[in-house]
Image (cartoon, helix red, strand yellow):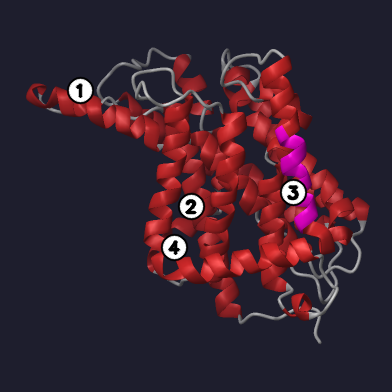
Amino acid sequence: MANSMKLPASVNAGKSLKIDAIRFLAAFWVLMYHFKPPLFRQLLPHQLSFLGGALWSGATALFAGPAAVIVFFVISGYCIHAAYHKDVALKPINYYASRFVRIGLPLIVLLCVVQPLPAGQNYLESVLWSLYCEMVYYAVYPFLRPRFSHIGEMIVGCVLMAGVMVACVRLLGHPACHGCVIETYHVPGTALLYAAGWIAGCLIAESQRNAAQFQIRGAYSPLTLAMKRGLDVSTRALANHLVALRVVVVAAGAFVMILLSESSLKPAMLPLITPDISLPVFQFLAAIWIATETATPSQSRVWSVLAVFGAWSYSLYLCHKTALALLEMTAFDEASRYAWFVEVALAFAISYAFYRLVEKPSHVISQRLRKYSPDVPGAPAA
């Protein structure tokens, strides 16, 4: 039997469109989370001020930035393994140089740019934690990949270790604050918290790209086979209900935000549940969603348009708060009626310019650093 099942170019193109589009939507969700929704009360007539307040509260819960980052992690695992799954053996120097130039060079350039800005470093810190986690996942991938026959055990092991870590901190330790994850667990602990989602992304790619291999007796552990069958069942059941699934994912992310909130957003009867508990649960819903989306590729024009923005979603994720840092150096009125629209427009302009000048060249360098062979696909865009 063949080691992998080759998919038609149109199918792979449809998957790529969706992945790029979802990556943009996740980056936009993070932007909205950091910028907060516009002040609807100022935009609506005085008689509708009550509606403006309701819209603002609803949008604040809707755009769940932390949940969007979890989606990024699942997509990252999927993209990395989809690109490298055919390699018999990774060349460590080329792999690490390629991956860390791809993510690290834009980060270093941006650090140099924002350093002179009074609030630039503080704004950048709010997104750095996820990039540090990505670097941990990139670093361990070459060691995990040869053992992906037991990828199910890896996922369960990460869940158990993360659960024990959270229980120890919550029962015996002292969290930095009720919603502080990176400050409490630091980079290694935070990476462990969300590692199951990243590895689940690898499992999705493994099950789709090596579908024939799963038919060979003994090629994968029973637990891995059970997880693969679970993914297959869920994707078949949900493929015709994608709109409903997307609504559920967005609603679940909003629910995570509501459970975390200490404001009037959260009804009194709901408990306060921190993201070190809620997001590790959400990551499995995100994995089911990504598995279903990639199993049902689409050439729809909507995905094509969003995918164009998805090509520079990393720059949008990395640079969007630079707009706030720049505006703080001017006499810009942050409380004005149209302040939010100016901030978002500037964030998009800065991010796109950064993509053209820094990220895209970094991607080219990253591809050249990797030694290609006839059976190896190009490096992923993530």
Label 4 to label 3: alpha-carbon separation: 33 Å
Label 2 to label 4: alpha-carbon separation: 10 Å
Is mark 2 in CB contact (under 8 Å) with mark 4? Answer: no
Judged from the image, the secondary structure of the residue bearing numbered disc 4 is: helix
> Which of label 3 and label 2 is nearer to you?
3
Judged from the image, the secondary structure of the residue bearing numbered disc 2 is: helix
Residue identifier under label 4: 303
Q: Residue furthest left?
A: 47
Residue plotted at (67% across, 25% down): 182
Front position in the image: 12 or 54: 54
In the displayed structure, 6 sits above or below 203; it is: below
Residue identifier under label 1: 42
Is 95 on the left or on the right of 316, as rendered? right
| Quadrant in the picture for residue 55 | top left
Residue identifier under label 2: 309
In the displayed structure, 29 sits above or below 190; it is: below
Residue identifier under label 3: 156
Amino acid beneath label 2: Phe
Residue 369 belongs to the span the image colors magenta: no
> Where are the magenta residues, as a range?
152-163
Amino acid beneath label 3: Val
User: Where the N terminus falls, by quadrant?
Assistant: bottom right
Label 2 to label 1: alpha-carbon separation: 30 Å
| Viewer can see residue 244 | yes
Amino acid beneath label 1: Gln
